[in-house]
Image (cartoon, coloured by chain):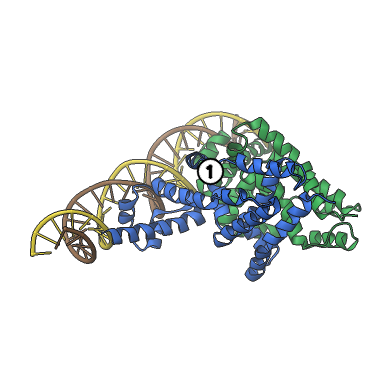
Chain colours: A green, B blue, C yellow, D brown
Amino acid sequence: MEQKKDNTEEKILNAAREVFVHKGMDGARMQEIANEAGINKALLHYYFRSKEKLFDAIFSKVIEFAFPGFANIISEETDFVTRLGKFIDAYFEMLLTHPFLPGFIIKELNRDPSGLFKLIAKYGFNPDFVLKEIEQAMDRGEIKRMDPRHLVINVISMCVFPFAVRPILNYLIFKDDQMAMSAFLGERPEVIKKFVIDSVAIKQ
Amino acid sequence: MEQKKDNTEEKILNAAREVFVHKGMDGARMQEIANEAGINKALLHYYFRSKEKLFDAIFSKVIEFAFPGFANIISEETDFVTRLGKFIDAYFEMLLTHPFLPGFIIKELNRDPSGLFKLIAKYGFNPDFVLKEIEQAMDRGEIKRMDPRHLVINVISMCVFPFAVRPILNYLIFKDDQMAMSAFLGERPEVIKKFVIDSVAIKQ
DNA sequence: TAGATTTTTAACCACCCGGTTAAATTTTTT
DNA sequence: AAAAAATTTAACCGGGTGGTTAAAAATCTA
């Protein structure tokens, strides 16, 4: 009983994630999720009473994944540049294994942001800690002084944006050459690190 | 006859753009577009036979707007840094007047990229020209040598991404203070310029 | 004014979608 | 074997959606 139930629930969640991530809340169909899970619509509603409840379950899992606990990296007791590099590497690892998350989150965010707000409030995520760490690095003279909010957004932008507009890059720059794009994305962590460090490093 | 027809068609296109940009193809309703235009559904279908045709009309207009002819800026005969600055300023002016375009384009892009491909092919937009200009600037020793594709994507990312995730920034960083966020976005062009130039400038 | 065009009204259709139901069947648990 | 739980089947419902229709009314053109 436990065995079977867990198995089916997992199949449903995997199928729902697949469909929701690619088609969004509006574009997803309960029938398609049932098919993808290899069950029927009645059983799908037997496990999750409504589309909304199922979507919320998926969305919170995805957000947990996309906003992971990188606080431990940021709060390590090494120099700022090292921590920044580790953060970019860790974030890219997540992006490369889940390349469709940025598009999905941006889509649902602009449809109805309230879901994200609730989750942020629930998990108590707060960027102030990161901003303060950056300011302290500036105080110590490790990097140039600038608005830490801009610095954070610059880094995140360069990491995430290419995944959000992946189809454009694929067509416009890589002419549908998947290998070329994968190679390009794979070298981006090092490129971004160098780009940022060259910008914020103190020349002497 | 001309007068009236043009007026109504314009009203429809404006209403459709408003609804489509905010709700996307899947979320938009023909009735809502008709209401927004101040007409009825029958007349809406009298002008545009189907939702798809209407969407295509809007989408191509939006793309023309979001991928504007900045070739003239890039091909100006000044130093690279000046041209880069002008490009960022021009692109931000577009973004600030149409802040919802990034989210809309990313949404529809991940739903069905074929529409964009057709338009790109139609207008013959090609990034190779920009990439070559950047390489020439590197040859002339104006900026550091790096993969020009990464440089282009870095700049575009930092410009566009904040608009795509606007609701997150609004909630997480600016605590619903619209003025603060507007001020922040307004200062970003200068921040990005300095950030990029500090990174790619040749130290001497 | 007469004819052509635009717009409204209001009902209608076929289809799809989320969700429900009830009974039968299978599987698991005890 | 008996009870409980999981799953299937298949039909159904209400509401919404894109789209159509036909006739009347309003507007514009010549």
User: Numbered disc 1: what chain?
Assistant: B
Q: Quadrant of the N terminus of chain A?
A: top right
Q: Compared with residue B22, is residue A7 higher up or lower down, i.e. above or below?
A: above
**Residue A15 seen in the figure:** no
Q: Residue at x 42, y 49 (%)?
A: B57
Q: Given the current orientation, which residue lies at the most extreme front position?
A: B77
- Characterize the local packing of mark 1: few (<14), some (14-19) or many (20 or more) Cα atoms within 10 angstroms: many
B23 displayed left or right of A154: left
Report whether C6 appears left or right of A124: left
Percent position of residue B164, x then y: 61, 54
Question: Which of B116/B172 is in front?
Answer: B116
Instruction: Evaluate whether residue A180 shows in this view.
Output: yes
- Location of the C terminus of chain A by quadrant is bottom right
Along the line of sight, the residue nearer the viewer: B74 or A13 = B74
Q: Residue at x 62, y 42 (%)?
A: A13
Q: How many marks?
A: 1
What residue do we see at 67% from left, 46% from top?
B152
Give the image location of residue A91, x and y in percent: 75, 46
For residue B68, side relative to residue A125 (left or right)? left
- Give the x, y percent position of residue A199: 80, 53
Question: Where does residue A80 sit, x and y in percent of width and height?
Answer: 87, 53
SS at badge 1:
helix
Frontmost residue, D3 versus B124: B124
Q: Which residue is mark 1?
A: B111
User: Considering depth in this image, is B107 or A49 the residue closer to the camera?
Assistant: B107
Compared with C26, B52 (above or below) is below
